[in-house]
C-alpha cells in the first residue's frame, strides 16, 4: 500500500470513527428546546393541526416540514422522534460526504479530498452535539457542497448533470432555512464571477435547480400556509427584536460581544497566511466563514448553535490546510504552529462544548421549575406562563408532559410591552398585544390546568420593564374573574407565582375555541 493510499485509508477510518462518536454522543445528550419544539410541531401536523393557526411559530415552514418523516417514524414505531431525526440526518450526511469527496477529488486530488471529507464528517457530527438537526448544521453542509462544485467549475472539470442537480437540491434546502442564509450563494457566486470573469456562466444546472427551488418555496406560503404571511409577519416585525439572551444590551454592545465570540475565525485565517495557502477551495471556505459570522451579527442573538456553520467550516478549513502542509517538502516549524493552532481550535469549538453537553446531558431545566413540575402528579395538567421557551415549553417536554399553548412561550411579550417610535408599528403592536393576550387566555381556559405557573421579573431590554405574566393576562376583566373563581393563590416559589385549581368549586366549563382567522 502506497503512502497516499495509507493516508486516505486513515482519513476514512477516522471519519467513520467520528460518525460513530457523534452518533453515540447525540443519543446520550438530550436535544435542545428548539429541536423538541420542531418535532412537537411536526407531530401536531401529522395529527391534523394547522401550522400558523393551531401552532403559532415565527419561523417559515420548511424546517418543520422536513421533520415530518422523523415524526411519522416515531408515531408508527418504538423509535423516539429525535433518534429518527438523527438517523435520517446521518443518511443525508453520508450522501453529502460522498458528493463532497467526488467533487473535491476533481480539484484537490484524492488524499486532499479525503482530508476534506474527514474534516466535513468531524464538523457535521461533533460540532452539532446536542443540536443535531439545527438549521446551521444544514447550512454548513450546503456551503461545503456548493463550494466544492464551484471549484470544479473554476477548474473546468466536467460535472455530471445528476450530480449538479443533487448538489443544487441539497444546497437549496440549507440556504432556504433562514432568509439570512441567501447571502452565502450570492456572495459565493460573486466570487465565482470574479474568478472566472468572461468565462462565467450563470445558467448552470445547479443555479437553475437552486432558482427553481427558491421560486417553488417562495410560493408555498401562499398555497399551503397563507397564515404565515397574514398572521405571523406583524408579530415578527413588532416583537422579535426583543427576544434573545442579550436584550439587556444595545445593538452596538451585542455586536461587540458577538464579534468577541467570533474571534476564532482568525485561527484558520492565520493558518492560511502561515502556510501561504492559495487554493480556491480554501479561499471560498474562508469567504463562507466570514459570511456565516456576518449572518450571526445580523441576527444579534447569542445562542451557541448560531455559530455551528462558522465553527464547522473553520475546523474543516484548518484540517485541509494542515494536511497540505504535511505534504510540503519543508515541514519543521512551518507545520508545528498550524498543527497546534488547529488542535486548539478543535478543542475549543468542538471538544469543550461536546464535553459540557455530555456532562449535563443537554440543556439543563431551570432547577426551581423542575422541582415544581416533578412534585406534581403525572396526570396533572400544568401550564407555564414564561417569556422564555427554556422555562415554558422545555420543562414540560423534558418531563414528558403535555404542552397546552399554541405558542413556544410568551417570547413576544417583551416586544409587545415596549412602545414603538414608528407610528405604523406602534398601531400593530397594540393590536398584537391584545390578540396574543386573548390567545393565551383561550389556551389556559381550554386546557383547564391543575396548576398555572406564572413568571415575574424584568424584561431584558436596555430600558428594563417589569413583567408579570399572570397580571398581563388579567388585564382582561373576564379572565380575571374566571381565574379568581376557579383558582387559589399559592405562595410564590422564587419568581414563579402559583395558581392551583380550586377543587371545592365546580370545574370550569369546557371552552369553545374561537375559529382561527384565515
Image (tube, rainbow, N blue to C red):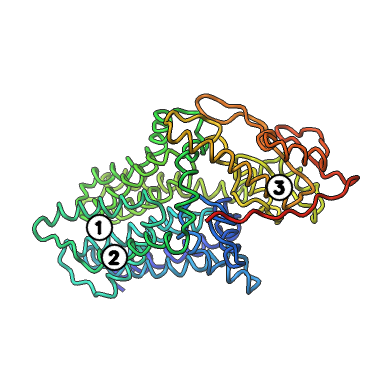
Q: From the viewer's perspective, tell me whether residue 492 is left or right of residue 103.
A: right
| Cα separation between marks 1 and 3 | 65 Å
Say if 267 sits above or below 190 in the image: above
* Sequence-earlier tag: 1 or 3: 1
Q: Are marks 3 and 2 in contact (CB under 8 Å)?
A: no
Query: In the image, residue 172 lies at what x, y percent?
Result: 35, 62
Within 10 Å of disc 1 (Cα), the crowding (few <14, some 14-19, many 20+) is few
Q: From the viewer's perspective, tell me whether residue 256 is left or right of residue 76.
A: left
| Cα separation between marks 3 and 2 | 60 Å
Within 10 Å of disc 3 (Cα), the crowding (few <14, some 14-19, many 20+) is many
Quarter of the image with the N terminus in it? bottom left
Residue under pointer 2: 111
Task: Count all numbered tags in the image, as a single digit.
Answer: 3
- Whether residue 436 appears in this view of the structure is yes
Q: Which mark is residue 327?
A: 1
Query: Foreground residue, 518 or 315?
Result: 518
Q: Are marks 2 and 1 in contact (CB under 8 Å)?
A: yes
Disc 3 element: helix
Residue at 20% from the left image edge and 47% from the top image edge: 276
Disc 1 element: loop
Query: In the image, residue 256 lies at what x, y percent?
Result: 39, 31
- Whether residue 100 appears in this view of the structure is no
* Sequence-earlier tag: 3 or 2: 2
* Sequence-earlier tag: 2 or 1: 2
Q: Are marks 1 and 3 in contact (CB under 8 Å)?
A: no
Q: Marks 1 and 3: which is nearer the front?
A: 3
Residue under pointer 3: 444
Q: Which mark is residue 158?
A: none
Residue at 52% from the left image edge and 30% from the top image edge: 418
Within 10 Å of disc 2 (Cα), the crowding (few <14, some 14-19, many 20+) is many
Q: Marks 2 and 1: which is nearer the front?
A: 2
Amino acid at each position: 500500500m502506497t503512502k497516499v493510499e495509507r493516508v486516505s485509508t486513515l482519513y476514512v477510518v477516522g471519519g467513520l470513527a467520528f460518525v460513530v462518536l457523534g452518533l453515540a454522543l447525540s443519543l446520550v445528550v438530550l436535544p435542545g428546546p428548539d429541536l423538541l419544539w420542531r418535532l412537537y410541531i411536526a407531530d401536531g401536523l401529522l395529527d391534523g393541526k394547522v401550522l400558523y393557526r393551531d401552532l403559532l411559530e415565527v419561523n417559515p415552514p420548511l424546517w418543520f416540514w422536513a421533520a415530518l418523516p422523523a415524526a411519522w417514524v416515531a408515531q408508527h414505531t418504538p423509535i423516539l422522534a429525535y433518534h429518527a431525526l438523527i438517523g435520517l440526518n446521518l443518511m443525508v450526511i453520508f450522501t453529502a460526504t460522498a458528493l463532497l469527496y467526488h467533487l473535491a477529488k476533481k480539484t484537490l486530488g484524492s488524499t486532499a479530498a479525503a482530508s476534506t471529507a474527514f474534516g466535513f464528517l468531524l464538523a457535521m457530527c461533533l460540532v452539532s452535539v446536542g443540536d443535531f438537526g439545527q438549521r446551521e448544521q444544514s447550512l454548513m453542509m450546503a456551503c461545503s457542497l456548493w463550494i466544492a462544485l464551484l471549484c470544479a467549475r473554476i477548474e473546468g472539470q466536467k460535472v455530471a448533470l445528476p450530480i449538479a442537480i443533487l448538489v443544487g437540491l441539497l444546497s437549496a434546502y440549507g440556504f432556504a432555512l433562514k432568509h439570512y442564509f441567501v447571502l452565502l450563494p450570492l456572495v459565493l457566486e460573486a466570487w465565482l464571477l470574479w474568478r472566472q470573469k468572461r468565462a462565467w456562466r450563470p445558467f448552470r444546472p445547479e443555479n437553475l435547480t437552486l432558482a427553481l427551488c427558491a421560486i417553488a418555496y417562495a410560493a408555498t406560503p401562499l398555497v399551503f400556509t397563507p397564515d404565515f404571511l397574514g398572521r405571523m409577519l406583524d408579530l415578527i416585525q413588532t416583537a422579535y427584536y426583543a427576544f434573545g439572551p442579550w436584550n439587556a444590551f444595545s445593538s452596538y454592545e451585542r455586536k461587540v460581544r458577538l464579534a468577541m465570540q467570533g474571534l476564532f475565525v482568525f485561527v484558520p485565517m492565520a493558518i492560511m497566511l502561515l502556510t501561504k495557502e492559495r487554493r480556491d477551495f480554501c479561499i471560498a471556505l474562508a469567504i463562507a466563514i466570514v459570511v456565516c459570522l456576518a449572518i450571526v451579527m445580523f441576527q444579534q442573538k447569542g445562542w451557541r448553535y448560531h455559530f455551528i456553520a462558522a465553527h464547522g467550516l473553520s475546523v474543516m478549513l484548518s484540517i485541509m490546510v494542515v494536511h497540505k502542509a504535511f505534504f510540503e517538502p519543508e515541514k519543521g516549524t512551518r507545520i508545528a504552529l498550524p498543527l497546534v493552532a488547529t488542535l486548539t481550535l478543535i478543542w475549543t469549538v468542538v471538544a469543550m462544548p461536546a464535553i459540557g453537553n455530555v456532562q449535563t446531558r443537554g440543556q439543563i431545566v431551570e432547577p426551581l421549575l423542575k422541582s415544581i413540575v416533578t412534585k406534581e402528579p403525572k396526570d396533572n395538567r400544568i401550564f407555564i406562563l414564561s417569556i422564555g421557551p427554556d422555562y415554558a415549553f422545555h420543562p414540560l417536554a423534558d418531563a414528558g408532559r403535555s404542552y397546552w399553548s399554541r405558542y413556544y412561550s410568551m417570547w413576544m411579550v417583551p416586544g409587545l410591552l415596549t412602545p414603538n417610535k414608528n407610528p405604523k408599528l406602534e398601531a400593530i403592536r397594540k393590536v398584537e398585544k391584545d390578540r396574543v393576550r386573548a390567545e393565551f387566555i383561550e389556551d389556559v381556559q381550554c386546557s383547564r390546568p391543575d396548576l398555572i405557573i406564572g413568571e415575574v421579573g424584568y424584561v431584558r431590554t436596555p430600558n428594563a420593564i417589569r413583567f408579570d405574566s399572570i397580571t398581563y393576562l388579567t388585564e382582561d376583566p373576564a379572565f380575571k374573574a374566571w381565574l379568581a373563581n376557579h383558582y387559589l393563590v399559592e405562595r410564590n416559589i422564587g419568581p414563579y407565582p402559583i395558581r392551583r385549581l380550586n377543587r371545592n368549586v365546580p370545574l370550569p366549563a369546557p371552552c369553545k375555541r374561537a375559529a382561527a382567522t384565515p
